[in-house]
Protein backbone atom coordinates (compact mmCIF):
# COMPACT_ATOMS: atom_id res chain seq x y z
CA UNK A 1 0.00 0.00 0.00
CA UNK A 2 1.04 3.61 -0.57
CA UNK A 3 2.84 5.13 2.37
CA UNK A 4 0.60 7.54 4.24
CA UNK A 5 1.92 11.07 4.93
CA UNK A 6 1.93 10.88 8.75
CA UNK A 7 3.60 7.49 9.10
CA UNK A 8 6.35 7.73 11.69
CA UNK A 9 4.34 10.19 13.82
CA UNK A 10 3.07 8.86 17.13
CA UNK A 11 0.22 10.51 19.06
CA UNK A 12 -0.57 10.18 22.77
CA UNK A 13 -4.35 10.59 22.75
CA UNK A 14 -5.55 11.53 26.23
CA UNK A 15 -8.83 12.96 24.90
CA UNK A 16 -12.41 11.73 25.13
CA UNK A 17 -15.94 12.29 23.79
CA UNK A 18 -15.88 13.71 20.24
CA UNK A 19 -13.81 16.84 19.65
CA UNK A 20 -10.47 15.29 20.63
CA UNK A 21 -10.84 11.73 19.27
CA UNK A 22 -12.32 12.87 15.94
CA UNK A 23 -9.27 15.07 15.40
CA UNK A 24 -6.84 12.28 16.25
CA UNK A 25 -8.88 9.96 14.02
CA UNK A 26 -7.90 12.09 11.03
CA UNK A 27 -4.24 11.89 12.07
CA UNK A 28 -4.59 8.11 12.38
CA UNK A 29 -6.32 7.79 9.00
CA UNK A 30 -3.34 9.48 7.38
CA UNK A 31 -0.77 7.25 9.02
CA UNK A 32 -0.04 8.40 12.57
CA UNK A 33 0.13 5.74 15.29
CA UNK A 34 -2.43 6.91 17.84
CA UNK A 35 -2.37 5.52 21.39
CA UNK A 36 -5.70 6.06 23.16
CA UNK A 37 -5.03 6.25 26.91
CA UNK A 38 -8.22 5.13 28.64
CA UNK A 39 -9.45 4.03 32.03
CA UNK A 40 -12.50 2.15 33.20
CA UNK A 41 -12.57 4.40 36.28
CA UNK A 42 -13.18 7.39 33.97
CA UNK A 43 -14.61 5.66 30.93
CA UNK A 44 -15.00 7.58 27.70
CA UNK A 45 -18.75 8.15 27.67
CA UNK A 46 -18.94 7.48 23.95
CA UNK A 47 -18.17 3.84 24.72
CA UNK A 48 -21.51 3.50 26.54
CA UNK A 49 -23.94 5.44 24.36
CA UNK A 50 -26.08 4.32 21.44
CA UNK A 51 -26.19 3.22 18.73
CA UNK A 52 -25.26 -0.29 19.90
CA UNK A 53 -24.67 -3.29 17.69
CA UNK A 54 -27.43 -5.92 17.61
CA UNK A 55 -27.39 -9.59 18.56
CA UNK A 56 -28.91 -12.15 16.21
CA UNK A 57 -32.17 -12.07 18.19
CA UNK A 58 -32.48 -8.32 17.71
CA UNK A 59 -31.49 -7.38 21.26
CA UNK A 60 -28.72 -4.84 21.88
CA UNK A 61 -25.19 -5.97 22.57
CA UNK A 62 -23.73 -4.67 25.84
CA UNK A 63 -20.29 -3.69 27.06
CA UNK A 64 -17.64 -1.08 26.35
CA UNK A 65 -16.84 -2.17 22.79
CA UNK A 66 -20.15 -2.15 20.91
CA UNK A 67 -21.01 1.52 20.54
CA UNK A 68 -21.14 2.60 16.90
CA UNK A 69 -20.59 6.15 18.15
CA UNK A 70 -17.22 5.34 19.74
CA UNK A 71 -16.08 2.86 17.12
CA UNK A 72 -16.67 5.19 14.18
CA UNK A 73 -14.30 7.81 15.60
CA UNK A 74 -11.51 5.55 16.81
CA UNK A 75 -10.74 3.20 13.94
CA UNK A 76 -7.16 1.98 13.78
CA UNK A 77 -6.08 3.37 17.15
CA UNK A 78 -4.36 1.50 19.96
CA UNK A 79 -6.00 1.36 23.40
CA UNK A 80 -4.17 1.10 26.72
CA UNK A 81 -5.89 1.14 30.11
CA UNK A 82 -4.00 3.31 32.57
CA UNK A 83 -5.00 4.59 36.01
CA UNK A 84 -3.89 8.23 36.02
CA UNK A 85 -5.14 8.77 39.57
CA UNK A 86 -2.07 6.87 40.80
CA UNK A 87 1.44 8.33 40.83
CA UNK A 88 2.80 5.27 39.03
CA UNK A 89 0.08 5.69 36.42
CA UNK A 90 1.23 9.24 35.80
CA UNK A 91 4.84 8.08 35.57
CA UNK A 92 3.80 5.51 32.97
CA UNK A 93 1.94 8.23 31.07
CA UNK A 94 5.17 10.23 30.97
CA UNK A 95 6.97 7.26 29.46
CA UNK A 96 4.35 7.05 26.71
CA UNK A 97 4.57 10.79 26.04
CA UNK A 98 8.37 10.54 25.95
CA UNK A 99 8.00 8.25 22.92
CA UNK A 100 5.41 10.39 21.14
CA UNK A 101 5.45 13.38 18.82
CA UNK A 102 2.03 14.76 19.72
CA UNK A 103 -0.04 14.86 22.91
CA UNK A 104 -3.76 15.67 22.75
CA UNK A 105 -6.29 16.23 25.51
CA UNK A 106 -9.64 17.99 25.85
CA UNK A 107 -10.07 17.50 29.60
CA UNK A 108 -10.58 20.61 31.74
CA UNK A 109 -7.53 22.36 33.23
CA UNK A 110 -8.59 21.07 36.66
CA UNK A 111 -8.14 17.47 35.50
CA UNK A 112 -4.89 18.31 33.70
CA UNK A 113 -3.53 19.76 36.95
CA UNK A 114 -4.71 16.73 38.92
CA UNK A 115 -2.95 14.32 36.57
CA UNK A 116 0.20 16.49 36.31
CA UNK A 117 -0.04 16.74 32.53
CA UNK A 118 0.68 20.46 32.15
CA UNK A 119 2.84 21.62 29.27
CA UNK A 120 5.63 22.66 31.64
CA UNK A 121 5.79 19.06 32.87
CA UNK A 122 5.52 17.49 29.42
CA UNK A 123 8.29 19.58 27.84
CA UNK A 124 10.61 18.48 30.67
CA UNK A 125 9.91 14.89 29.65
CA UNK A 126 9.97 15.48 25.90
CA UNK A 127 11.22 18.91 24.72
CA UNK A 128 10.05 18.17 21.16
CA UNK A 129 6.49 17.29 22.13
CA UNK A 130 3.62 19.11 20.42
CA UNK A 131 1.04 19.35 23.19
CA UNK A 132 -2.58 20.16 22.33
CA UNK A 133 -4.90 21.37 25.09
CA UNK A 134 -8.50 21.77 23.91
CA UNK A 135 -10.82 22.29 26.91
CA UNK A 136 -14.20 23.86 26.29
CA UNK A 137 -13.31 27.33 27.61
CA UNK A 138 -9.52 27.40 27.44
CA UNK A 139 -6.70 27.04 29.96
CA UNK A 140 -7.30 30.37 31.66
CA UNK A 141 -10.12 32.78 32.43
CA UNK A 142 -13.04 32.71 34.89
CA UNK A 143 -14.73 29.78 33.10
CA UNK A 144 -11.64 27.61 32.61
CA UNK A 145 -13.10 24.68 34.54
CA UNK A 146 -16.62 24.81 33.07
CA UNK A 147 -17.71 21.42 31.75
CA UNK A 148 -19.38 20.86 28.40
CA UNK A 149 -19.32 19.42 24.91
CA UNK A 150 -20.95 20.17 21.56
CA UNK A 151 -24.50 20.49 22.89
CA UNK A 152 -23.25 23.09 25.39
CA UNK A 153 -21.04 24.93 22.92
CA UNK A 154 -23.83 25.60 20.42
CA UNK A 155 -25.81 27.77 22.87
CA UNK A 156 -22.75 29.29 24.58
CA UNK A 157 -21.29 30.47 21.27
CA UNK A 158 -24.55 31.92 19.92
CA UNK A 159 -25.29 29.25 17.32
CA UNK A 160 -28.49 28.15 19.07
CA UNK A 161 -29.72 31.74 19.27
CA UNK A 162 -29.74 31.83 15.47
CA UNK A 163 -31.11 28.30 14.98
CA UNK A 164 -34.85 27.81 14.82
CA UNK A 165 -37.90 29.84 13.87
CA UNK A 166 -38.78 33.43 14.79
CA UNK A 167 -40.87 33.91 17.93
CA UNK A 168 -40.10 30.37 19.09
CA UNK A 169 -37.43 29.19 21.55
CA UNK A 170 -33.98 28.43 20.08
CA UNK A 171 -33.36 24.74 19.50
CA UNK A 172 -29.82 24.52 18.18
CA UNK A 173 -28.68 22.41 15.26
CA UNK A 174 -29.88 18.99 16.41
CA UNK A 175 -26.43 17.51 16.92
CA UNK A 176 -23.15 18.25 18.67
CA UNK A 177 -22.02 20.12 15.57
CA UNK A 178 -18.78 21.65 16.97
CA UNK A 179 -17.53 18.20 18.02
CA UNK A 180 -17.71 16.83 14.49
CA UNK A 181 -16.61 19.65 12.26
CA UNK A 182 -15.11 22.82 13.71
CA UNK A 183 -12.99 21.74 16.66
CA UNK A 184 -11.39 18.56 15.26
CA UNK A 185 -10.65 20.35 12.00
CA UNK A 186 -8.94 23.21 13.84
CA UNK A 187 -7.01 20.68 15.94
CA UNK A 188 -5.65 18.85 12.90
CA UNK A 189 -4.66 22.12 11.23
CA UNK A 190 -2.86 23.29 14.36
CA UNK A 191 -1.00 19.97 14.76
CA UNK A 192 0.14 19.97 11.12
CA UNK A 193 1.34 23.57 11.49
CA UNK A 194 3.29 22.69 14.63
CA UNK A 195 4.81 19.62 12.97
CA UNK A 196 5.99 21.79 10.09
CA UNK A 197 7.51 24.25 12.55
CA UNK A 198 9.26 21.40 14.39
CA UNK A 199 10.62 19.99 11.14
CA UNK A 200 12.21 23.36 10.46
CA UNK A 201 13.44 24.22 13.96
CA UNK A 202 13.56 21.00 15.96
CA UNK A 203 11.33 22.61 18.59
CA UNK A 204 8.00 21.45 19.95
CA UNK A 205 5.32 23.79 21.23
CA UNK A 206 2.09 24.10 23.17
CA UNK A 207 -1.19 24.47 21.27
CA UNK A 208 -4.09 25.93 23.22
CA UNK A 209 -7.36 25.40 21.39
CA UNK A 210 -10.26 26.74 23.50
CA UNK A 211 -13.27 25.12 21.87
CA UNK A 212 -15.44 28.17 22.53
CA UNK A 213 -13.06 30.39 20.54
CA UNK A 214 -12.73 27.79 17.80
CA UNK A 215 -16.52 27.69 17.39
CA UNK A 216 -17.45 31.38 17.51
CA UNK A 217 -15.64 31.97 14.23
CA UNK A 218 -18.43 30.10 12.39
CA UNK A 219 -21.00 32.75 13.31
CA UNK A 220 -20.41 34.36 9.94
CA UNK A 221 -21.51 38.00 9.79
CA UNK A 222 -23.52 37.97 13.03
CA UNK A 223 -20.84 39.63 15.16
CA UNK A 224 -19.83 42.00 12.36
CA UNK A 225 -23.45 43.08 11.91
CA UNK A 226 -23.81 43.84 15.61
CA UNK A 227 -20.55 45.75 15.60
CA UNK A 228 -21.54 47.79 12.54
CA UNK A 229 -25.16 48.62 13.28
CA UNK A 230 -26.25 47.04 16.55
CA UNK A 231 -28.28 44.34 14.78
CA UNK A 232 -28.71 41.12 16.72
CA UNK A 233 -29.04 38.26 14.22
CA UNK A 234 -32.29 36.43 14.90
CA UNK A 235 -33.64 33.01 14.07
CA UNK A 236 -34.98 32.87 10.55
CA UNK A 237 -36.03 29.25 10.22
CA UNK A 238 -35.11 27.96 6.77
CA UNK A 239 -35.23 31.38 5.17
CA UNK A 240 -32.19 33.25 3.91
CA UNK A 241 -31.58 36.98 3.47
CA UNK A 242 -30.03 36.31 0.05
CA UNK A 243 -32.45 33.79 -1.48
CA UNK A 244 -36.20 33.37 -2.03
CA UNK A 245 -37.66 30.84 -2.06
CA UNK A 246 -35.24 29.20 0.35
CA UNK A 247 -36.46 26.27 2.40
CA UNK A 248 -37.48 22.63 2.66
CA UNK A 249 -40.70 21.74 0.85
CA UNK A 250 -42.92 18.71 1.43
CA UNK A 251 -43.00 15.97 -1.18
CA UNK A 252 -44.70 12.57 -1.45
CA UNK A 253 -44.10 10.07 1.37
CA UNK A 254 -41.40 7.47 0.83
CA UNK A 255 -42.80 3.96 1.50
CA UNK A 256 -39.29 2.48 1.54
CA UNK A 257 -38.06 4.62 4.44
CA UNK A 258 -37.36 2.60 7.58
CA UNK A 259 -38.78 4.97 10.19
CA UNK A 260 -39.75 8.34 8.74
CA UNK A 261 -41.70 8.26 5.46
CA UNK A 262 -42.10 12.05 5.15
CA UNK A 263 -39.96 13.41 2.35
CA UNK A 264 -38.71 16.91 1.63
CA UNK A 265 -36.70 18.75 -0.99
CA UNK A 266 -34.53 21.80 -0.28
CA UNK A 267 -34.74 24.61 -2.84
CA UNK A 268 -32.86 27.91 -3.03
CA UNK A 269 -33.36 30.62 -5.68
CA UNK A 270 -30.73 33.33 -5.41
CA UNK A 271 -31.78 35.38 -8.43
CA UNK A 272 -34.66 36.06 -10.80
CA UNK A 273 -33.29 33.72 -13.47
CA UNK A 274 -33.40 30.78 -11.08
CA UNK A 275 -36.93 31.73 -10.00
CA UNK A 276 -38.10 31.82 -13.62
CA UNK A 277 -36.43 28.47 -14.26
CA UNK A 278 -38.21 26.99 -11.25
CA UNK A 279 -41.61 28.25 -12.45
CA UNK A 280 -40.95 26.87 -15.93
CA UNK A 281 -39.87 23.49 -14.52
CA UNK A 282 -43.21 23.17 -12.72
CA UNK A 283 -45.16 24.22 -15.81
CA UNK A 284 -46.22 27.53 -14.25
CA UNK A 285 -44.27 30.19 -16.21
CA UNK A 286 -46.94 32.79 -15.47
CA UNK A 287 -46.04 32.76 -11.77
CA UNK A 288 -42.66 34.26 -12.61
CA UNK A 289 -44.31 37.52 -13.67
CA UNK A 290 -46.84 37.65 -10.81
CA UNK A 291 -46.25 41.09 -9.20
CA UNK A 292 -45.93 39.39 -5.79
CA UNK A 293 -43.00 37.27 -6.99
CA UNK A 294 -41.47 38.93 -10.06
CA UNK A 295 -38.47 40.40 -8.22
CA UNK A 296 -36.35 39.28 -5.30
CA UNK A 297 -37.67 42.15 -3.17
CA UNK A 298 -41.26 41.18 -3.98
CA UNK A 299 -40.63 37.54 -3.15
CA UNK A 300 -39.11 38.45 0.21
CA UNK A 301 -42.09 40.72 0.96
CA UNK A 302 -44.55 37.90 0.17
CA UNK A 303 -42.55 34.95 1.48
CA UNK A 304 -45.46 33.17 3.18
CA UNK A 305 -47.45 33.13 -0.07
CA UNK A 306 -44.33 32.21 -2.03
CA UNK A 307 -43.61 29.17 0.13
CA UNK A 308 -47.25 28.06 -0.02
CA UNK A 309 -47.11 28.22 -3.80
CA UNK A 310 -43.90 26.19 -4.07
CA UNK A 311 -45.24 23.65 -1.56
CA UNK A 312 -48.37 23.19 -3.70
CA UNK A 313 -46.10 22.29 -6.63
CA UNK A 314 -43.86 19.85 -4.75
CA UNK A 315 -46.65 18.18 -2.76
CA UNK A 316 -47.27 14.64 -3.99
CA UNK A 317 -44.18 14.52 -6.18
CA UNK A 318 -41.18 12.28 -5.54
CA UNK A 319 -38.43 14.33 -3.89
CA UNK A 320 -35.69 12.81 -6.03
CA UNK A 321 -37.61 13.69 -9.20
CA UNK A 322 -38.11 17.28 -8.06
CA UNK A 323 -34.42 17.69 -7.22
CA UNK A 324 -33.31 16.21 -10.54
CA UNK A 325 -35.77 18.36 -12.50
CA UNK A 326 -34.66 21.60 -10.83
CA UNK A 327 -30.96 20.77 -11.04
CA UNK A 328 -31.40 20.18 -14.78
CA UNK A 329 -32.73 23.77 -15.05
CA UNK A 330 -29.91 25.29 -13.02
CA UNK A 331 -31.89 25.69 -9.80
CA UNK A 332 -30.05 24.67 -6.56
CA UNK A 333 -32.06 21.79 -5.07
CA UNK A 334 -31.47 18.60 -3.13
CA UNK A 335 -33.35 15.88 -1.30
CA UNK A 336 -33.38 16.17 2.49
CA UNK A 337 -31.72 12.81 3.06
CA UNK A 338 -31.65 10.60 6.14
CA UNK A 339 -29.12 8.05 7.36
CA UNK A 340 -30.69 5.25 5.32
CA UNK A 341 -30.24 7.34 2.19
CA UNK A 342 -26.62 8.19 2.93
CA UNK A 343 -25.59 4.63 3.66
CA UNK A 344 -27.73 2.54 1.32
CA UNK A 345 -29.51 4.56 -1.35
CA UNK A 346 -27.43 7.56 -2.41
CA UNK A 347 -25.95 6.45 -5.74
CA UNK A 348 -23.36 9.24 -5.69
CA UNK A 349 -22.00 8.26 -2.26
CA UNK A 350 -21.88 4.62 -3.35
CA UNK A 351 -20.01 5.50 -6.53
CA UNK A 352 -17.53 7.53 -4.51
CA UNK A 353 -17.01 4.66 -2.04
CA UNK A 354 -17.01 6.96 0.96
CA UNK A 355 -18.13 4.51 3.65
CA UNK A 356 -15.62 1.85 4.67
CA UNK A 357 -16.75 -1.53 5.98
CA UNK A 358 -14.55 -3.14 8.65
CA UNK A 359 -14.83 -6.33 10.69
CA UNK A 360 -14.88 -5.69 14.45
CA UNK A 361 -14.46 -8.63 16.88
CA UNK A 362 -17.60 -7.75 18.88
CA UNK A 363 -19.83 -5.76 16.55
CA UNK A 364 -19.10 -7.66 13.34
CA UNK A 365 -19.01 -5.95 9.96
CA UNK A 366 -19.91 -2.29 10.24
CA UNK A 367 -19.67 0.94 8.28
CA UNK A 368 -17.12 3.60 9.24
CA UNK A 369 -16.72 7.13 7.94
CA UNK A 370 -13.97 7.19 5.34
CA UNK A 371 -11.29 9.87 4.93
CA UNK A 372 -12.74 13.37 4.80
CA UNK A 373 -10.35 14.39 2.02
CA UNK A 374 -8.30 12.59 -0.61
CA UNK A 375 -4.64 13.10 -1.41
CA UNK A 376 -3.72 11.90 -4.89
CA UNK A 377 -0.20 10.73 -4.01
CA UNK A 378 -0.52 9.79 -0.34
CA UNK A 379 -4.15 8.82 0.34
CA UNK A 380 -5.37 8.02 3.81
CA UNK A 381 -7.22 4.84 4.74
CA UNK A 382 -8.63 3.01 7.76
CA UNK A 383 -6.16 0.28 8.66
CA UNK A 384 -8.21 -1.47 11.37
CA UNK A 385 -11.49 -1.24 13.29
CA UNK A 386 -11.79 0.54 16.62
CA UNK A 387 -9.90 -1.03 19.52
CA UNK A 388 -11.44 -2.97 22.36
CA UNK A 389 -10.97 -1.25 25.71
CA UNK A 390 -7.37 -1.93 26.75
CA UNK A 391 -6.80 -4.22 23.77
CA UNK A 392 -3.23 -3.00 23.20
CA UNK A 393 -2.08 -2.54 26.78
CA UNK A 394 0.57 -5.26 26.49
CA UNK A 395 1.75 -4.09 23.07
CA UNK A 396 2.12 -0.46 24.17
CA UNK A 397 3.92 -1.45 27.36
CA UNK A 398 6.37 -3.76 25.62
CA UNK A 399 6.96 -2.19 22.21
CA UNK A 400 6.58 1.53 22.94
CA UNK A 401 7.49 1.93 26.62
CA UNK A 402 9.97 -0.95 26.79
CA UNK A 403 8.69 -2.82 29.87
CA UNK A 404 9.34 -6.51 30.40
CA UNK A 405 6.70 -9.06 31.42
CA UNK A 406 7.61 -8.97 35.11
CA UNK A 407 7.26 -5.18 35.23
CA UNK A 408 3.92 -5.37 33.44
CA UNK A 409 2.67 -8.05 35.84
CA UNK A 410 3.61 -5.89 38.83
CA UNK A 411 1.78 -2.86 37.38
CA UNK A 412 -1.30 -5.00 36.72
CA UNK A 413 -1.22 -6.27 40.29
CA UNK A 414 -0.96 -2.72 41.63
CA UNK A 415 -3.92 -1.52 39.55
CA UNK A 416 -1.78 0.90 37.51
CA UNK A 417 -2.62 -1.05 34.37
CA UNK A 418 -6.17 -2.35 34.32
Image (cartoon, helix red, strand yellow):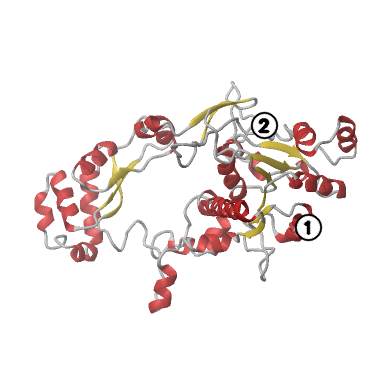
For mark 2, does the 10 Å Cα neighbourhood hold few (<14), some (14 to 19), or many (20 or more) residues?
A: some
N-terminal of the pair, mark 1 or mark 2, is: 2
Label 2 residue SS: loop
Most foreground residue, 286 or 343: 343
Residue occupying the point 24% across, 38% down: 324
Residue occupying the point 69% across, 52% down: 129
Label 1 residue SS: helix
Asked if residue 119 lies left or right of residue 324, the reply is right
Residue occupying the point 16% across, 54% down: 273
Question: Which residue carries the number 2 mark?
Answer: 62
Q: Is residue 146 above or below residue 348?
A: below
Q: Is residue 248 above or below residue 342?
A: below
| Discs 1/2, front | 1
Residue 316 visible, this orientation: no
Q: Is residue 296 above or below residue 106?
A: below
Question: Which residue carries the number 1 mark?
Answer: 121
User: In the current view of this chain or complex, which residue is farthest to the top?
Assistant: 56
For mark 1, does the 10 Å Cα neighbourhood hold few (<14), some (14 to 19), or many (20 or more) residues?
A: few
Residue 102 disc label: none
Which percent across, then down, holds residue 8?
Answer: 63, 39
Quarter location, residue 150: bottom right
Quarter location, residue 234: bottom left
Q: Give the quarter of the figure containing the C terminus.
A: top right
Asked if residue 216 lies left or right of residue 96, the reply is left
Residue 363 visible, this orientation: yes
Which percent across, then down, holds residue 144?
Answer: 67, 65
Most foreground residue, 257 or 87: 87
Which percent across, then down, holds residue 99?
Answer: 74, 44
- Total residue callouts: 2
Most foreground residue, 118 or 203: 203
Amino acid sequence: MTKRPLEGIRVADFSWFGAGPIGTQTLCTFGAEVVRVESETKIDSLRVVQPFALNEDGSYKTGYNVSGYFNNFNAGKLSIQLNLNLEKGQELAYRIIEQCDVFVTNFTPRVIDKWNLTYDKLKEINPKIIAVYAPMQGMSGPHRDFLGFGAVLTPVTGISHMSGFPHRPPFGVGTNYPDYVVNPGQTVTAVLSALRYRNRTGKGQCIELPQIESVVNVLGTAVAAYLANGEDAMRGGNRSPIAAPHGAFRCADDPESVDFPDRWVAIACKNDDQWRALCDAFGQPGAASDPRFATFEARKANEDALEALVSSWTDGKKAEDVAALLQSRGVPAGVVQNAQDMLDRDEHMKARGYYVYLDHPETGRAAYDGPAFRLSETPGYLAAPAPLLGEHTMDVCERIIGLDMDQIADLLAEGVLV
